[in-house]
Amino acid sequence: MPTFPFSTGTTITNVAYNELSDIVLEVIGIGEDGYGLYDAWTTPITSSMPIRARSWDNLIRDLINNCYHHITNINTTTNSYASVLNNISTATTSTTISVDLHNRLKEVADFVLANRYTCAEEHYYQDPQTGAKIDFTGGVSQRTLPWGVTKRSITHVTRVRWANRLVARYFFNTGGYLTWQPYYTDGVNDTIDQDWSNFIDLVRLQMEDPAQEIRYDRAAFVGQLAGTTSTVANYTEGSLYMNVEVFKSSGADYVDFTVTFGNNATDLLVVTPSTGYWNEIV
């Protein structure tokens, strides 16, 4: 097969077409590293079959709309590949598929393959009422004894479960991730309340920096062995601390976010702060 990019006069064979279709099906398909889409339009072409205009239509539909748009969110009617869509949408059985069209599709396919696990921010969850792109759930854990009595911490566990291991992989393969932010839900009534409030505000301020945001993403999920726990964050301020750990189940079908709020001070504190923290599914 000629070397890409093809030159004018090169015959585009089923092998060259299938190189593109293989990329599309690998990215959006139901394999270990795919998006989990069962209804792809693209199908490989055997050596005895002609490459029809409909085959190119299906390929461009999956490549641009299901892959390229997902990664970039660029409107496919106005981006630099719009002419590709126009060319293919008007193809008929008598139309000659140009080498330039194949070469441009190959460029898009290579870009998609290299950025397959990226999701454009515009595609993440958005609350229909507030417009917010963060959906915090998980409830509140509250300490009922004064700090310094028995144990000096609050531990809160939130479980995120998928139907099975592959569905979990699809979630992360499409750019999904889990994150966490702390909140202080009680009034500031005493020094320890103020200390917790200031500490939590400080941590949240740090998390506003994308470089410091907690993201349990595909790399973290795939890199963590099943049945193990990993620490994803550890914050301290004076005697106060917050630890965030993630446990990946032995079947890799759920993860537990465990967040511990603690106080290492040895003095007995009489005021009980109420703290809540959540994890986010994007």
Image: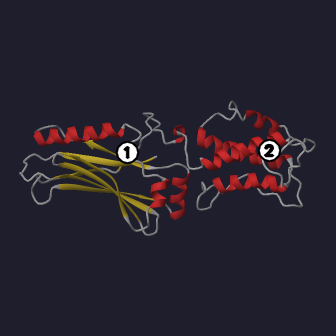
| Residue 95 drawn at (x, y percent) | 90, 41
Q: Badge 2: how crowded within 10 Å, few (<14), some, or many (20+)?
A: many
Classify 25 as above or below 209.
below
Classify 75 as above or below 217.
above
- Identify the residue at the far top of this view: 78
Element under disc 2: helix
Alpha carbon distance from label 1 to label 2: 45 Å
Pick the quarter of the image with the N terminus.
bottom right
Q: Amino acid at mark 2?
A: His
Q: Badge 1: how crowded within 10 Å, few (<14), some, or many (20+)?
A: some
Q: Residue at left 38%, top 37%?
A: 209
Left or right: 170 with respect to 233? Answer: right
In the rendered image, which residue does mark 2 sit on?
102
Whether residue 100 is visible, yes or no, is yes
Whether the residues at callouts 1 and 2 have beta carbons within 8 Å, the answer is no
The mark tally for this picture is: 2
Q: Residue at left 15%, top 41%?
A: 193
Examine the image and state in which quarter residue 134 appears: top left
| Residue 29 drawn at (x, y percent) | 65, 57
First reached walking from the N terminus: tag 1 or tag 2: 2
In the rendering, which numbered label is found on residue 136? 1
Q: Amino acid at mark 1?
A: Phe
Examine the image and state in which quarter residue 73 appears: top right
Whether residue 66 is visible, yes or no, is no
- Identify the residue at the far front of this view: 3
Viewer-proximal residue among 274 and 257: 257
Element under disc 1: strand
